[in-house]
Image: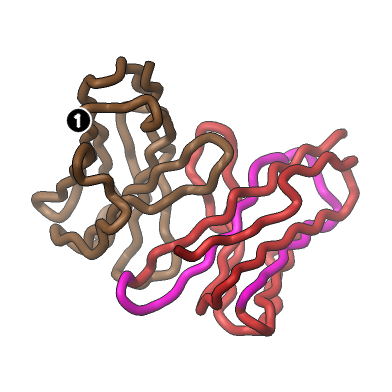
Amino acid sequence: EAGVAQSPRYKIIEKRQSVAFWCNPISGHATLYWYQQILGQGPKLLIQFQNNGVVDDSQLPKDRFSAERLKGVDSTLKIQPAKLEDSAVYLCASSPGQGALEQFFGPGTRLTVL
Amino acid sequence: GQQLNQSPQSMFIQEGEDVSMNCTSSSIFNTWLWYKQDPGEGPVLLIALYKAGELTSNGRLTAQFGITRKDSFLNISASIPSDVGIYFCAGQNYGGSQGNLIFGKGTKLSVKP
């Protein structure tokens, strides 16, 4: 079974530029999560989708971050414009259904904002 | 919001030694989970605990769900070099945002051969 795929693996941009990350969850998984992991910290949830609907985006900085999962499969997370403090690893995870205990994580995208 | 305190922050041990790390919270959780993260990879689930007082093993790993539901510990017996990595605890509640995980800051484990 293929795992969660993410791209790109690394991205370096300058502040005020825009960036987008892509995630393809495990086939058949209804729930998709985006996490931000700052160096030395645990992952922090940004947004949770159930199929193509948003379940929780309470910790998403909506003035600059946006995410979509239009067809209920893959998802994109965008930052526009980026700030220095956005430098982090952005992890995508999926699980079979809402409330399912095991979330399967992708390898992440490491973003550096200069 | 809910926060988890994980300790120790880092550990340097000799191969073959046992390891213990723990996690505490100011509020209760319905589920405790322990993850391991290798460099450049996402976290991988090691053990999930569903009931207060539960003790669960997975090979050389043993974890317990505290009776107060506010803490958990993870033990690794007879450590080996591949145990190197960052171990995260995570708490989970059901309700408004089902499935959301709250992570600790991690314990970085280094093993000297």
Q: Residue at x 55, y 79 (%)?
A: B50
Q: Residue at x 56, y 65 (%)?
A: B33
Chain B, chosen colour in render:
red
Q: Is residue A60 left or right of residue B7?
A: left
Residue B5: give x, y in percent of width and height.
64, 58
Residue extent of the magenta highlight: B70-97
Q: Is residue B80 magenta?
A: yes
Which secondary structure lies at badge 1? loop
Q: Find disc 1 in the rendering and name its residue.
A: A80
Q: Is residue A102 magenta?
A: no
Counting labels gives: 1
> Which chain: brown?
A
Which of the pair A85/A72 is nearer the observer? A85
Residue A54: give x, y in percent of width and height.
18, 60
Taking A55 as reference, is A23 above or below it? above
Q: Is residue B15 left or right of residue B42?
A: right
Q: Residue furthest left?
A: A70
Query: Tag 1: residue type?
Result: Gln
**Quadrant hosting residue A104:** bottom left
Whether residue A26 is visible here, answered yes or no, is no
